[in-house]
Amino acid sequence: MGLDLQQWKLIMTRYQIAIEELKSDLNIIDMDWKIRLGYSPIEHLKVRVKSIESIQKKLQKKSLDETVDNITTKLHDIAGARIVTNFEGDVYLILQHLQHRDDYRIMKVKDYIQKPKPSGYRSVHVLAEIEVVLHERVVWIPVEIQIRTLSMDFWAATEHKLQYKYQNGSIPQQAIDALKQTALVATQLDSEMSVIRQQIVSHEQNKEA
């Protein structure tokens, strides 16, 4: 027997509050960095909460009953956020900020930049619990946060669309090899942009000195 509408409403509301809390926190940090440093590593931010239908399909895929406990303790990607930066170094700057917040609990970090997936996919995935203050108590809600550069985001979005196109059949090996090659090109682009950025920063510092 599944959950009733009221139970679903309570669950979904808490995840929506958590994602709004995260969004608000990052917008504040973005403004603070811009004011104090004249630069923010956050290029843009996307957030989402899975639909009830998507959650139900995920439960079925994992052979889990539709219960509050299974949803809140076994599924960790119901609420998600993607933080996109300009430079690879900014990915780790944001990660460091998240790790030092008292209202976040970092449960797991998967660094697919240092160790890319076989497909070429690169990003840092963070599983965090966010403190949500309700009327009568405090709860901690899990949120999956992905942090990546613009080039990583472009590659991942394009690769996802191609995978969807071929979901009913295998992707040609030639296309798989080409995707891996473009991932290397994106990595090189990130590296070269970081070098250019450092050259500009060093030049400005020398002028001030």
Image: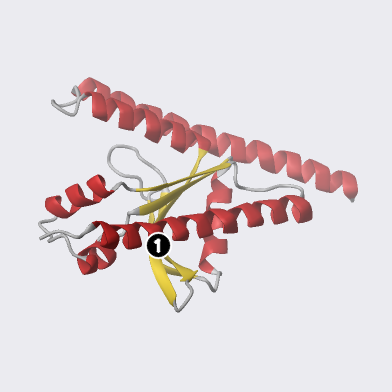
Residue placed at 25% from the left, 29% from the top? 164
Front position in the image: 91 or 79: 79
Tell me if residue 115 can be seen.
yes
Direction from residue 162 to residue 65 in the image, left or right = left
Residue placed at 61% from the left, 40% from the top? 194
Kind of residue sitting beneath label 1: Arg
Where does the image place residue 93, in percent across and percent down from the top left? 58, 56
Q: Secondary structure beneath disc 1?
A: helix
Residue placed at 52% from the left, 32% from the top? 189
Residue extending furthest toward the bottom: 136
Direction from residue 203 to residue 83 in the image, left or right = left
Where does the image place residue 51, in percent across and percent down from the top left? 30, 46
Q: Which residue is mark 1?
A: 14
Dot 1 crowding, Cα within 10 Å, few <14, some 14–19, many 20+? some
Tell me if residue 126 can be seen.
no
Residue placed at 26% from the left, 22% from the top? 175
Where does the image place residue 16, in percent across and percent down from the top left? 43, 55
Tell me: residue 132, above or below residue 37: below
Where does the image place residue 204, in percent across and percent down from the top left? 82, 43
